[in-house]
Image (cartoon, rainbow, N blue to C red):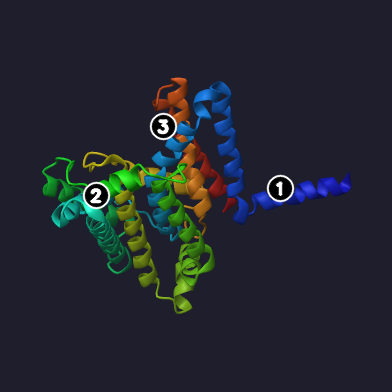
Amino acid sequence: MARRAADSNGLMRLLASGRFRWLWLLVCLLGLFAFFAAWNPTAVLSTYNVRNIIGDASTLLIVAVGVTFVVATAGIDLSLGAVLIFCQVIAAKTMIAVGGSGWDATLAGTAAALLAGIAWGTLNGVMVARLRIPPLIATLGTLGMAGGTALLITNGINVRTGIPDELTLVIGAGRLFNLLPYTSVVAIVVVAAAVFALNYTRFGLHVLGIGSNEVAVERTGVNVASVKIRVYALSGACAGLGAVVDLARFSTTAVGAYSTLSLEAIAAAVIGGTSLFGGVASIIGAVIGVFIPAVLRNGFVILGVSSFWQQIAVGIILVTAVYIDQRRR
């Protein structure tokens, strides 16, 4: 009996530790999914529905991974939605210029989107790290600049033609082993790379160190400004890749959408255990933080509940996550 109690206490301590805190979130996510499945198992547990949940979360998942690094440095990036739209426009225009078909156009558009995202992210990083502009103001400024430039290029009209079939039919509609959408495969690769970078590289160590104590890290000889610029560039690159994934799924740009993408990505990171005060981050937690609202949204639709309740529920979860983080710190 005593040994069983000790083992139970050890497990509880392990789950509560920072390294495995995301396991609690996973339990909550599975419980949420089980709740909706109990109400309508046929609809919720169908392969089609599960595939839709995973596919719909792909774009946000990629963006949330990038912004997790930013938040880990005690920064913030509000420009991601506008940057994603700008990258979509650049990708579509590049594909059309190259010929509008074939893998060469697809690769050229993808490269253009990534470069555009990195450029905006680098601008954010320079303003924050070199010019000492607060991240909130710097990224709010680039939000307006990127979004406005995208509207100028397109005159506010979505690009619907000239997107290569190789992008939309093969990647956007295709599935690995006829099960997992290729867009989700891209997101999984991004997540795996981010987990490795954050937990097993010097770059990840510097990111978490800057969020914990920037002055102390700088005194050890680390170029803090350079790390911050790279972090924001990474966030921009993820927005660029997310733009291509979204373009592959819907075959059109979305100049009037994604106004709340930055807030959704930041909320996913915070719900997943990344501290708004910096120094603590979890990529796996951010993944779960993306899927909790996705499952809520999907479940409410299946049950015929107003989507407005989903916003309320996510808001409560977000405030609770921040409160727990404050108490823990």
Judging depth in this view, the residue of 113 and 239 nearest the camera is: 113
For residue 128, above or below residue 32: below
**Pointer 2: what residue?**
88
**77 lies left or right of 325:** left
Cα gap from disc 1 to disc 2, whole angstroms: 45 Å
Please say whether residue 154 is visible from this viewpoint: yes
Q: Earlier in the sequence, mark 2 or mark 3?
A: 2
From the viewer's perspective, tell me whether residue 111 is left or right of residue 324: left
**Image check: 128 left or right of 181?**
left
Seen as rendered, the residue at the extreme bottom is 221
Residues at marks 1 and 2 touching, judged by CB atoms closer than 8 Å: no
Give the label, 1 or 2, closer to the camera. Answer: 2
Across and down, in percent, residue 181 comes to 42, 44
Q: What is the crowding at mark 2: few (fewer than 14 residues within 10 Å), some, or many (at least 20)?
A: many
Q: Which residue is mark 3?
A: 311
**Which residue is at 45% across, 68% downward?**
214
Q: Amino acid at mark 1?
A: Met
Identify the secondary structure beneath mark 2. helix
From the viewer's side, name the closer residue of 43 and 240. Answer: 43
* Residue 172 place in picture, x, y as percent: 33, 44
Residue 121 marker: none
Earlier residue among tags 1 and 2: 1
Would you name the residue on which mark 1 appears? 12
